């Protein structure tokens, strides 16, 4: 077993480019460091997702040869089951949107209870650890995100830790620029540099391994300052393209101090991908709108998993042994490690504040598609990888938690995201092949006694099947309405200038018409990704960071130094307790 490097504490804070690293017990990641020379490269349980590829999706194309009645019933059932699930999603999303509009201007700091000495102590010492992991993102994008933290109403309660990768281009210059600009803006501000394979040879590059290192480094620093109070500390994981509502952490603090089981839950804010989303191609915008609606309608209310930007108690993070560095999907895998820590389903509570997250983006038409395809593929591969982990660790959850979570996970990632639209496409193709296959069905009927449907019944089946698609397009109108409402909230909170994300009727109508084809495109990528991970296994499980070049104007580190307020560098140099 290779030893993990433990950083030696240095005397001067500002003299160091990277201001903290895991030390002591927090540098001891024994479980993840264990080498498994005979580990199977081809994972096993993810192969169950092949059922969607080879059975559920293509079933309408051939099952009518043996049983035409079953084929008709199957097509109608799948179509209307999908329509029902999307209707539930729309209803849940509208409810969440109503909640956000109702409380968007509320204050929360004054509502924190201070009736007992313990409540007063916790309220006075409340702090929020914010971890932002990055790699090759433009400095302008990173600074936009940190600026949204600087604009928090409780910014002085924030301990911000920026986790950069060792291989980040100009990593030292970026770290110095960030320290110079933000050193005195928060309670504390740190930058870390994640060494490659710090937790062992099985570590997968990406946010999970970086988050594992960065969070351990942050806890190390809190302990050294005597600030490691788990009763008063929340933690938040976010990306470098995240724009927070000004009262996000005010609301988080209120919920953390007033929720009875605050150390057993996680918090998720609604994510909107309206970061130059109106400038993206139709398929990028369609998937962005869909993901925002699915977050509100599925992921949060049914406790499936967090996504990209989420908060939790630091106590729960430590009990769950931080982040699993052998997996790429930090948000999904974190939900499962928390389930192991508390031995039950993890409840996901909503923070009724919109958070803007960057969509996939590129600098050219081909680059846009390439980035969209690559990230869509990675999401599905990550889900398959996590499903394998879930089944392997199933004995660490109680039976009801494992059954309910596994059911929702498969329904969401297997059926809704992959199979729903492709099964519909297969059904539509089958409608067109009815006349071609009629003679074959008649020959098979001599042995099966299952005769083809009459023309009248075939017409009824087609109408009922197509009506589910029509209903789905009505639901899409609600999704576009929710997007418009989200933009209003974002503009109201001044996260975006008024009109910056505006779209005209023609663009909306075009994107609405192309919404279903866009979902078909996404499902095709998911179909391919399931096959790819089934054949190649762990070899394709890695977190290639999405490009953010299309979200920035291209300011470099040197240009951003000019934005530092007068005296900022001197203030940072003299601030030894950051």
Image (spheres, rainbow, N blue to C red):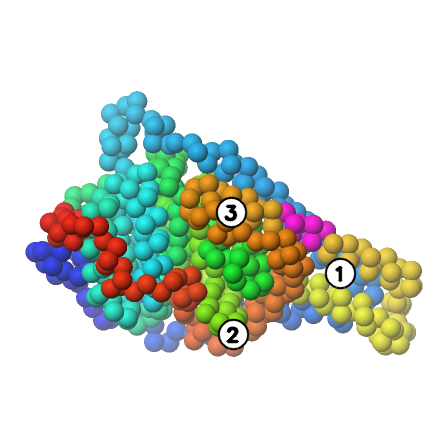
Which residue is at the front of the view, 291 or 539? 291
Residue count near mark 3 (Cα–Cα under 10 Å), binned few <14, some 14–19, many ≥20: many
Q: Is residue 175 above or below residue 258?
A: below
Pointers 1 and 3 in contact (CB under 8 A)? Answer: no
Say which residue appears at 23% left-offset and 59% top-offset.
561
The circle on residue 75 is: 1
What span is colored magenta in the figure? Answer: 471-478
Q: Position of residue 152 (x, y in %)?
A: 33, 42
Dot 2: what SS? helix
Q: Residue furthest left?
A: 11
Q: Which residue in the protein does label 2 denote?
A: 366
Q: Which of the two marks, 1 or 2, is nearer to us in this view?
A: 2
Dot 1: what SS? helix
State the CA–CA distance, disc 1 to disc 3.
37 Å
Query: Magenta residues: mostly which secondary structure?
Result: helix
State the CA–CA distance, disc 1 to disc 2.
35 Å
- Answer with mark 1 or mark 2, whichever residue precedes in sequence: 1
State the CA–CA distance, disc 3 to disc 2.
27 Å
In this picture, residue 441 sits left or right of residue 24: right
Q: Which residue in the protein does label 3 denote?
A: 487
Say which residue appears at 71% left-offset and 66% top-offset.
425
Residue count near mark 1 (Cα–Cα under 10 Å), binned few <14, some 14–19, many ≥20: many
- Answer with mark 1 or mark 3, whichever residue precedes in sequence: 1
Which residue is at the front of the view, 243 or 209? 243
* Magenta-drawn stretch contains 483: no
Which residue is at the front of the view, 227 or 16? 16
Q: Is residue 168 above or below residue 406?
A: below
Residue count near mark 2 (Cα–Cα under 10 Å), binned few <14, some 14–19, many ≥20: few
Say if residue 168 shows up in the picture: yes
Q: Quadrant of the N terminus?
A: bottom left
Task: Report which quarter residue 508 is drawn in.
Answer: bottom right
Dot 3: what SS? helix
């Amino acid at each position: 077993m290779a030893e993990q490097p433990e950083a030696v504490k240095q005397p001067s804070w500002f003299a160091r480019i990277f201001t903290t690293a895991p030390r002591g017990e927090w540098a001891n990641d024994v479980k993840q460091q264990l080498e498994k020379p005979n580990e199977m490269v081809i994972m096993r349980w993810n192969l169950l997702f092949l059922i969607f590829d080879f059975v559920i999706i293509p079933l309408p194309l051939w099952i009518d040869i043996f049983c035409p009645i079953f084929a008709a019933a199957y097509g109608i059932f799948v179509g209307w089951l999908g329509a029902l699930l999307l209707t539930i999603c729309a209803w849940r999303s509208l409810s969440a949107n109503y909640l956000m509009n109702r409380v968007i201007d509320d204050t929360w700091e004054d509502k924190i209870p201070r009736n007992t000495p313990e409540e007063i102590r916790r309220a006075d010492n409340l702090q929020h650890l914010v971890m932002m992991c990055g790699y090759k993102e433009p400095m302008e994008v990173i600074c936009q995100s940190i600026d949204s933290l600087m604009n928090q109403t409780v910014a002085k309660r924030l301990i911000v830790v920026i986790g950069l990768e060792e291989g980040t281009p100009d990593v030292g210059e970026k770290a110095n620029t960030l320290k110079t600009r933000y050193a005195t803006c928060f309670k504390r501000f740190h930058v870390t540099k994640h060494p490659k394979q710090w937790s062992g040879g099985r570590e997968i590059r990406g946010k999970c391994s970086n988050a594992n290192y960065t969070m351990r480094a942050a806890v190390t620093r809190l302990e050294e300052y005597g600030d490691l109070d788990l009763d008063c500390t929340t933690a938040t994981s976010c990306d470098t393209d995240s724009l927070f509502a000004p009262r996000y952490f005010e609301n988080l603090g209120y919920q953390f101090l007033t929720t009875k089981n605050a150390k057993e839950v996680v918090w998720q804010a609604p994510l909107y991908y309206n970061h130059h989303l109106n400038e993206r191609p139709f398929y990028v915008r369609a998937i962005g709108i869909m993901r925002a609606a699915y977050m509100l309608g599925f992921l949060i209310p049914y406790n499936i998993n967090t996504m990209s930007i989420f908060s939790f108690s630091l106590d729960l993070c430590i009990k769950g042994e931080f982040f699993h560095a052998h997996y790429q999907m930090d948000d999904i895998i974190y939900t499962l490690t928390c389930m192991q820590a508390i031995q039950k389903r993890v409840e996901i509570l909503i923070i009724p504040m919109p958070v803007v997250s960057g969509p996939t983006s590129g600098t050219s038409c081909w680059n846009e598609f390439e980035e969209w395809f690559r990230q869509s593929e990675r999401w599905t591969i990550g889900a398959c990888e996590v499903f394998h982990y879930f089944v392997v660790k199933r004995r660490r959850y109680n039976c009801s938690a494992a059954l309910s979570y596994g059911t929702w996970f498969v329904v969401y990632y297997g059926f809704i995201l992959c199979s729903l639209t492709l099964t519909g496409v297969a059904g539509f193709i089958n409608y067109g092949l009815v006349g071609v296959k009629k003679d074959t069905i008649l020959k098979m009927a001599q042995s099966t006694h299952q005769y083809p449907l009459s023309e009248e019944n075939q017409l009824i089946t087609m109408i009922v099947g197509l009506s589910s698609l029509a209903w789905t397009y009505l639901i899409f109108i609600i999704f576009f309405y929710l997007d418009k409402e989200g933009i209003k909230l974002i503009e109201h909170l001044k996260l975006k200038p008024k009109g910056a994300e505006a779209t005209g009727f023609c663009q909306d109508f075009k994107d609405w018409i192309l919404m279903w084809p866009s979902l078909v495109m996404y499902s095709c990528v998911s179909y391919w990704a399931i096959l790819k991970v089934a054949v190649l296994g762990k070899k394709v499980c890695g977190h290639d960071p999405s490009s953010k070049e299309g979200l920035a104007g291209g300011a470099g580190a040197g240009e951003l130094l000019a934005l530092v307020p007068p005296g900022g560098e001197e203030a940072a140099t003299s601030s030894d307790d950051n």
